[in-house]
Image (cartoon, helix red, strand yellow):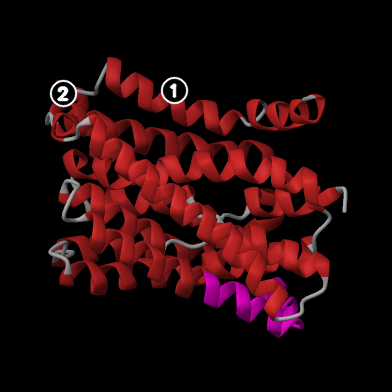
């Protein structure tokens, strides 16, 4: 029992979890409405623009290129994130579409196309004694590619499932997500040193914007009465689906590392970089693609998966650190 206390401390000390839970709770109790709701889109778009500008500044291209000496590991992580996990999300979405509200089922596909986390995957990789340098490179690379791959793959696959992204949605993706990212890449040689020097406050800006986006999305769903479409049985079915994807994500990544005969440190890196999904990319992308009354429903599987992956990663990392 005493060995479980470090797990609880690790989870409880993650203030981002509490920030997200607070945003959802606030939306349920005090949803954004009236005049504030009308300007929320502007606030959300401005915040997302700033976040992806910072993403572009912080993701150093030369570091990513230099880190690709271990091509087998990096290739495995990339294929797992955008191959295995995408197929898992697509399959779950198609199967559950017969039993869940369409946007909730679509959320599983949305979950599948997203890149890995950066901070969380690297942190747990470090705790487990994995290859931290490779984790940083792989997470940065999947995020770099995910900014383009995630919306494109979602557009292609969702259109077949009746969730087509409109022309206006593509324009918003380009102008609010891709454009600031490219600008950040272009100006990073001048601005990146200052951003790295102040990475604490800058990192919290990311988290606060994600929380605001979650609050706006869930507020829209509350005001539209979207949650009344979901009963307890459907929530249980969604939770079961997420549990299966979570088990596949972590179990499959560890098994793949064994099949590839990776050294133990690299297997740990594949485990955390391959199975985790980024809400920092997902929440802004959902806010751009969907109106608030739909975004909350689409985001729910990602939000629950994000919380679950942190809860699972803590004991797994601590256990692997002992071996």
Q: Residues within 10 Å of mark 2 (few under 14, many from 20)?
A: few
Q: Quadrant of residue 93?
A: bottom left
- The residue labelled by disc 2 is 35
Residue found 72% across the figure and 32% down from its top = 7
- Residue drawn at (45%, 56%) of the image: 245
Q: Residue 19: give x, y in percent of width and height.
A: 50, 27
Q: Is residue 317 left or right of residue 161?
A: right
Say above or below: 174 vs 283. Answer: below
Quadrant position of residue 1: top right
Q: Is residue 234 above or below residue 2?
A: below
Question: Distance of mark 1 from mark 2, alpha carbons?
Answer: 22 Å
> Which mark is on residue 55?
none
SS at badge 1? helix
Magenta residues, start to end:
62-80
Residue 115 in sight in this render: yes
What is the secondary structure assignment of the residue under circle 2?
A: helix
Q: Main secondary structure of the magenta part?
A: helix
Residue placed under numbered mark 1 in the picture: 22
The question of residue 248 being in magenta is answered with no
Camera-side residue of 53 and 137: 137
Task: Inspect this view and state whether residue 48 appears.
Answer: no
The crowding category of the residue bearing disc 1, from other C-alpha atoms within 10 Å (few below 14, some 14 to 19, many at least 20), is: some
Q: Residue 71 in magenta?
A: yes
Q: Residue at x 12, y 64 (%)?
A: 162
Q: Earlier in the sequence, mark 1 or mark 2?
A: 1
Left or right: residue 44 compared with residue 134: left
Which quadrant: the C terminus?
Answer: bottom right
């Amino acid at each position: 029992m005493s060995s479980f206390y470090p797990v609880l401390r690790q989870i409880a000390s993650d203030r981002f979890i509490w920030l997200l839970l607070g945003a959802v709770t606030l939306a349920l109790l005090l949803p954004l409405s009236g005049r504030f709701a009308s300007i929320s889109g502007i606030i959300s778009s401005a915040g997302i623009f700033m976040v992806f500008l910072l993403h572009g500044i912080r993701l150093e291209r030369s570091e990513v290129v230099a880190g690709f000496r271990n091509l087998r590991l990096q290739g495995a992580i990339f294929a797992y994130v955008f191959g295995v996990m995408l197929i898992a999300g697509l399959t779950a979405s198609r199967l559950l579409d017969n039993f869940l509200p369409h946007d909730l089922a679509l959320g599983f596909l949305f979950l599948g196309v997203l890149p890995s986390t950066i901070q969380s995957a690297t942190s747990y990789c470090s705790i487990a004694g994995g290859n931290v340098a490779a984790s940083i490179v792989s997470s940065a690379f999947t995020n770099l590619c995910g900014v383009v791959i995630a919306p494109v793959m979602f557009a292609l696959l969702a259109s077949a499932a009746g969730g087509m992204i409109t022309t206006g949605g593509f324009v918003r993706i380009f102008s609010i997500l891709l454009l600031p990212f490219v600008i950040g890449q272009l100006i990073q040689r001048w601005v990146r040193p200052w951003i790295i020097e102040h990475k604490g406050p800058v990192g919290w800006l990311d988290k606060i914007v994600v929380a605001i986006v979650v609050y706006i999305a869930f507020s829209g769903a509350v005001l539209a009465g979207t949650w009344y479409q979901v009963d307890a049985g459907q929530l249980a079915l969604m939770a079961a689906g997420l549990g299966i994807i979570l088990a596949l994500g972590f179990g499959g990544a560890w098994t793949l590392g064994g099949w590839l005969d990776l050294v133990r440190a690299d297997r740990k890196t594949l485990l955390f970089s391959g199975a985790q999904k980024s809400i920092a990319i997902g929440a802004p992308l959902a806010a751009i693609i969907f109106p608030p009354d739909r975004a909350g429903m689409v985001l729910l599987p990602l939000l629950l998966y994000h919380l679950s992956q942190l809860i699972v990663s803590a004991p797994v990392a601590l256990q692997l650190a002992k071996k």
